[in-house]
Image: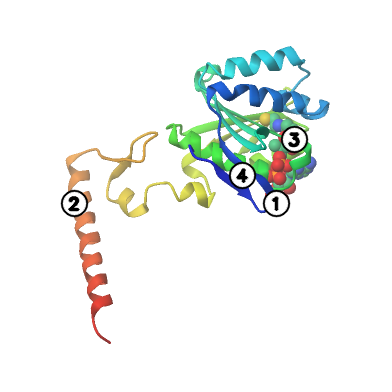
Amino acid sequence: MNGTETAGAALKGTIRTLSPREMPLLRDHLLRLDRDSRRNRFNGVVDDSFIESYTAKCASDGTIVVAYLTDGEVHGAAELHQPEQSSDHLPEMAFSVEREVRRKGLGSLLFKKVLKAAERAGFERVRITTGSGNEAMKSLARKFGAHLTFGHGESTGIIELNKIASPSIAADLPQPDLLKAGLRPVAGRRELKVATPTDFARASVALGRWYWRQVFRAWEIRRPV
Ligand SMILES: CC(C)(COP(=O)(O)OP(=O)(O)OC[C@H]1O[C@@H](n2cnc3c(N)ncnc32)[C@H](O)[C@@H]1OP(=O)(O)O)[C@@H](O)C(=O)NCCC(=O)NCCS
């Protein structure tokens, strides 16, 4: 997601990705979280200097931040951390919404947007980790198809992006007709690739069918009743 979008009826702000230079806005948002929210967000107790260096690192390590802004301040964020940051090379997501704007669907909206960003970046699966007592985050993750497992006081869930049920994400996936025709999506891009000569033959037939459907449809529209 590149552009700015309004968040929805219950929320007056806008949602967009932050540039690396804007990470101080993420820092100020994380510093504003109340004590419990900060502990839930980092799954432990962290002080201000940790947040300062954490957000400085986000500015240089390719972290994607989808943010909810009002009056130039970030009040909600979804972070997507690059796979190199984790031991098993899975990109990891993290969420934070300030108390004043919770339970208005903002967490869900940010979730949707960050999954879209992950899909565009070419990732096939993403991980979410949260404290096992964090009911709000667990419920949010389950809403998007995460199957959570528990261990060491944490809940971890993997979301397979190609199995996602969310219509707004599914809408951006290749059409079933094209998939049946043997066309494959290129990771992270909206193009489609022909992989083998058989794919090419199938794709030509599908394209031919599509062309003649359009011709017949146009003829039907113009035919006098
Ligand atoms: C988790 C968090 C991001 C949710 O944000 P939000 O804007 O309130 O989320 P939504 O309004 O979109 O609600 C999402 C779902 O979670 C459920 N939910 C929200 N708060 C809940 C709570 N306290 N208990 C149980 N379920 C809850 C809602 O019912 C909703 O499901 P629904 O749409 O089917 O009704 C927010 O509570 C938060 O920032 N918490 C502190 C930081 C944190 O815990 N981060 C997670 C670590 S990665």
* Residue 49 vs residue 135, the one in the foreground: 49
Q: Is mark 1 within 8 Å of ligand 1?
A: no
- Residue 96, percent from left and from top: 69, 32
- Residue 46, percent from left and from top: 76, 17
* Residue 112 vs residue 34, the one in the foreground: 34
**How far apart, in angstroms, are the residues tagged by discs 1 and 2?**
47 Å
Task: Say which element carries label 2.
Answer: helix
Q: Residue at x 46, y 42 (%)?
A: 162
Residue extending farthest to the right is: 35
Q: Going from the N terminus, do you reach mark 1 or mark 4 first?
A: 1
Q: Colour scheme used in the picture?
A: rainbow
Provide the residue designation for mark 1: 10
Name the side, left or right, on which 222 lies relative to 11. left
Q: Is mark 3 within 8 Å of ligand 1?
A: yes
**How far apart, in angstroms, are the residues tagged by discs 3 and 1?**
15 Å
Name the side, left or right, on which 68 lies relative to 48. left
**How far apart, in angstroms, are the residues tagged by discs 2 and 3?**
52 Å
Provide the residue designation for mark 4: 109
Q: Going from the N terminus, do you reach mark 4 or mark 3 first?
A: 3
**How far apart, in angstroms, are the residues tagged by discs 4 and 3?**
14 Å
CA neighbours of label 2 inside 10 A, class few (<14), some (14 to 19), many (20+): few
**How far apart, in angstroms, are the residues tagged by discs 4 and 2?**
39 Å
Provide the residue designation for mark 3: 98
